[in-house]
Amino acid sequence: MRPEYDPRDDPPWAMQLVVRAEKADPPGHRAVCEAAATAVVRLLTDPRAADPGGEWHGAVLEWESRRIRKVTRRARGVRWPEAGALPGVTVEHAGAQVRVFPPAPVADVPPALAKLQVAGLDLADEGAAPPPEPPYAVIAINPDVTMTTGKAAAQCGHAAQLLLRGGRCKDVAAWLDGGARVHLATDVPWKRCVKEAAVAVRDGGFTEVPPGTMTAIAWIVRK
């Protein structure tokens, strides 16, 4: 872990995630977390981010040299298409819509995103769902840590990103070929899975949880 202050984080950068959360028909907690994780991976593997010379490539490299902060915001009504007009990647999944944007300094967030609310996105848990057909990534949230949906979505994004960057090459390639699908597991034996997981997320402690808290783990199921 890096120290609480690191000169490489000055100025701080973040990836913005926007969740569509209409009052009349909001998405479920699990669907948002799964969509957020997939959206992060799809942006990072988009040619605009992954290819040298791509318009997002330099920003992603700069951000990944720092803490990989993510900020989850919510949008409803006209705010959602306003956010959608900005460059980014949208994932629709199980009734959830999440759009992620190329990372940037937190002081340079576009006005259409800056005015969207950050705190308080806490959606109803729609319950467990069966996993998709392999290959897919499993993400498990620490059952001993209480987080809002916005915080959990960011942690799932972290887990998916760490899996993309640090997972076994064959597993990651199969996962990406399958569409980078994600399953949020809620009934796994946490302590055993921590030992067996491919990656673990330890939070920087900027919101909701103390620094160093293990918030999520992830691994890939190929068959």
Image (cartoon, rainbow, N blue to C red):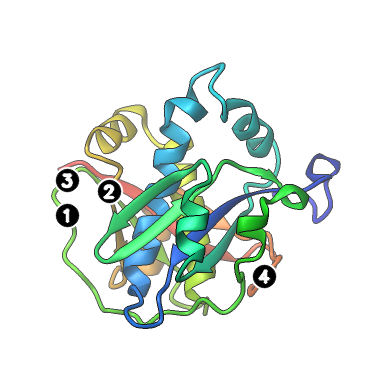
Which type of secondary structure does the marked residue at label 1 adopt?
A: loop
Q: Which dot, 3 or 2, sits closer to the camera?
A: 2
Res. 207 mark: 4
Residue depicted at 46% across the width and 62% down the height: 80
* Residue labelled with disc 1: 132
Residue type beneath disc 4: Thr
Q: Residues within 10 Å of mark 1 (few under 14, many from 20)?
A: few
Give residue 173's position: percent from left, percent from top. 30, 29
As measured in the structure, the alpha-carbon distance from the residue carrying label 1 to the one carrying label 2 is 8 Å
As measured in the structure, the alpha-carbon distance from the residue carrying label 3 to the one carrying label 2 is 9 Å
* Residue labelled with disc 3: 134
Q: Residues within 10 Å of mark 4 (few under 14, many from 20)?
A: few
Give residue 133's position: percent from left, percent from top. 13, 49
As measured in the structure, the alpha-carbon distance from the residue carrying label 1 to the one carrying label 4 is 31 Å
In the foreground, 162 or 189: 162
Residue depicted at 68% across the width and 59% down the height: 204
Q: Which quadrant of the figure has residue 65?
A: top right
Residue type beneath disc 3: Pro
- Dot 1 or dot 2: first in sequence order is 1
